[in-house]
Structures are given as structure tokens and as C-alpha cells.
């Protein structure tokens, strides 16, 4: 993310906290796709994810005067969404581990149109090989790789989103990389 985007996020967040409805709407537009993409990693129920995103923004608007400033707007929103999905799925009994959201299918999947555009068979085979490697990782490691490489989150941000220690983030990320390297060498 460029510095200008980062600065504009912080400015919009500050304006939103002061009650600016236009800044609020711009924040929703700016982060909706990232939130939707992240939420879809937990459930195939797109309507549930969309409802959760809407609920996050409604809660934010209602509590804007109580919220704190943040330097990391996107990661704050990802954390809020994750908690909202946990709450929604827990109330609907959609997963079995209490208070733990399970990262579903590997996020490292090419969309059909993108797949069709890949003409080179060698590249296509490599993509599927990498996907297979990633699918073999534990879900928590997949989620950390997703947050690191797709969402450009750092260890501090990931530890907040997942509510785990920063050291656990490093350990899981290193273990994922080590497993991918060892599988790739076989």
C-alpha cells in the first residue's frame, strides 16, 4: 500500500470519528472488497459475510464517539469483521470449536477467468502445484499466509486479528514456510 493511501485512510478514520458521514461512506467503499474477500475465507455463505460487514459498519457508526484512533484502519476492520463472523456463526452453531473461527479453503485459488487467461501449460501446472502445497498446510498457517501476503499485514497486526501472541505468528509463519520448502524439494 502506498504512503498516500495509508495517509488518506488515517485522515478518513479521523474524520469518521468526528461524525463525518462522507468519510464513513468512503471507508466502507475503500475496504469493502478486502473485508468481503477475507470473510469468504471462513464460510461459503456470502450473504452472512455481507451481513457481518454491514453489521461491523453499523456498530462502528453507532459507537464512533467511543472509538480510538488507529494507524491501521484496514487491520482494525479485519479484526472487527473476524469477531462479527465468530459471533454470527456461534449464534447459528455453524462451527464446532467455541470462539475459534476456522479458516476454510485455501485463499490461494485462481478465479476461473484468470485460469482461462493462463495460456502457458508450465505456468498452469506450477500454480496448481503451489495450490496443492498450500492446501496441505493447517488452516491457521493458511490464514497467516493469507494475511501476510494478500492483506500485507505485519506480525503485530496479525496477532491482534487472530488474538494470538506475536511470537506465535512468527512461529506459525516460519513453520508454514518450512513446510512449503520441504514439500517443494520432494
Image (tube, rainbow, N blue to C red):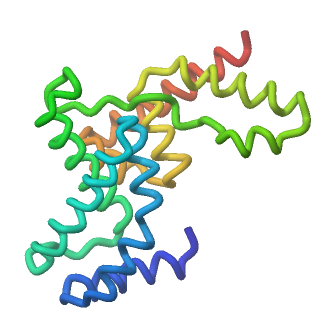
Where, quadrant-wise, is the C terminus in this rendering? Answer: top right
Horizontal relation, residue 3 to residue 163: left or right: right
The residue shown at (38%, 45%) is 46
Q: Nearer the viewer, residue 100 or 115?
A: 115
113 or 56: which is nearer to us?
Answer: 113
Q: Position of residue 141 (x, y in %)?
A: 44, 29
Q: Splitting the image into 4 quarters, where does residue 169 fall?
A: top left
Compared with residue 13, is residue 117 higher up or lower down, i.e. above or below?
above
Total labels drawn = 0
Q: Is residue 134 left or right of residue 86?
A: right
Q: Quadrant of residue 21?
A: bottom left
Residue at image location 80% in from the left, 25% down from the top? 125
Residue furthest front in the image: 47
Task: Give the image location of residue 182, x and y in percent.
Answer: 64, 16
Residue at 51% across / 54% down in the picture? 152
- Looking at the picture, how far across and down is residue 173, in whole percent? 47, 33
Q: Can you say which quadrant of the picture contains the N terminus?
A: bottom right
Q: Nearer the viewer, residue 80 or 10?
A: 80
Note whether 38 is above or below 119 in the view shown: below
**Residue 81: x and y, percent?**
28, 53
Say above or below: 62 vs 112. Answer: below
The residue positioned 65% from the left and 15% from the top of the image is: 183
Amino acid at each position: 500500500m502506498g504512503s498516500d493511501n495509508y495517509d488518506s485512510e488515517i485522515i478518513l478514520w479521523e474524520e469518521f470519528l468526528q461524525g463525518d458521514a462522507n468519510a464513513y461512506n468512503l471507508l466502507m467503499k475503500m475496504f469493502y472488497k478486502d473485508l468481503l474477500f477475507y470473510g469468504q475465507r471462513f464460510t461459503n455463505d456470502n450473504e452472512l459475510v455481507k451481513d457481518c460487514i454491514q453489521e461491523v459498519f453499523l456498530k462502528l457508526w453507532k459507537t464512533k464517539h467511543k472509538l480510538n484512533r488507529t494507524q491501521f484502519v484496514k487491520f482494525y476492520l479485519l479484526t472487527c469483521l473476524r469477531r462479527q463472523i465468530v459471533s454470527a456463526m456461534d449464534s447459528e452453531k455453524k462451527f464446532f470449536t467455541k470462539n475459534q473461527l476456522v479458516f476454510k479453503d485455501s485463499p490461494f485459488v485462481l478465479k476461473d477467468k484468470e485460469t482461462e487467461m493462463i495460456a502457458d501449460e508450465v505456468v498452469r501446472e506450477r500454480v496448481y502445484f503451489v495450490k496443492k502445497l498450500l492446501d496441505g498446510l493447517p488452516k491457521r498457517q493458511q490464514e497467516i499466509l493469507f494475511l501476510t501476503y494478500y492483506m500485507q499485514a505485519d506480525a503485530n497486526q496479525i496477532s491482534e486479528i487472530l488474538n494470538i501472541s506475536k511470537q506465535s505468528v512468527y512461529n506459525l509463519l516460519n513453520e508454514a514456510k518450512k513446510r512449503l520448502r520441504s514439500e517443494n524439494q520432494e
